[in-house]
Image: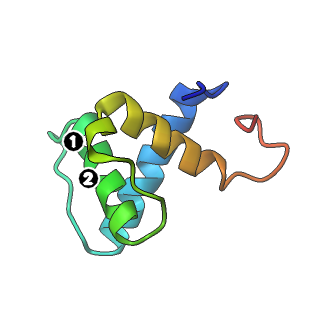
Amino acid sequence: MKKLKHEAELFKAALLAGVRYAEGRKAVEFEPTDSASAKALYVYRLLVHDKVIAPMPEDQVSEKTVRHRLATWYAHQLPQGHPLFG
């Protein structure tokens, strides 16, 4: 798993986009007290369920790998030349 150049910023943006996706789809309504880890895992599982991203083997699912997978998913949606791209 190669670390992305701006992985922390990409993850934050991916989490916001994923939460908007999940709530817009009416799949969930997150509470302000929900942790970023819980939101990330839910968003990851929803994106896998909707076949937006490929699933990881269950023994590899951890907070670190979920954060990386969401950051990678978001990075692929960015236009070429975006400051977070690359």
Side (left or right) of 83 relative to 35: right
Which residue: 35% across, 52% down? 44
Indicate the quadrant containing the N terminus: top left, top right, bottom left or bottom right.
Answer: top right
Residue 16 percent location from the top left of the image: 43, 48
**Amino acid on which disc 1 is placed:** Ala
- Dot label at residue 42: 2
User: Which residue is identified by label 1?
Assistant: 38
Residue 21 percent location from the top left of the image: 41, 65
Please tell me which residue lies in front, 25 or 44: 44
Q: Is residue 48 above or below residue 1?
A: below
Helix, strand or loop at mark 1 = helix
Q: Is residue 5 above or below residue 49?
A: above
Mark-to-mark CA distance, 2 and 1? 6 Å
Query: Do callouts 2 and 1 mark residues in contact (Cβ within 8 Å)?
Result: yes
Q: Is residue 12 above or below residue 41?
A: above
The 10 Å Cα crowd at callout 2, few under 14, some 14 to 19, many 20 or more, is: some
Helix, strand or loop at mark 2 = helix
**Amino acid on which disc 2 is placed:** Tyr
Side (left or right) of 38 relative to 13: left
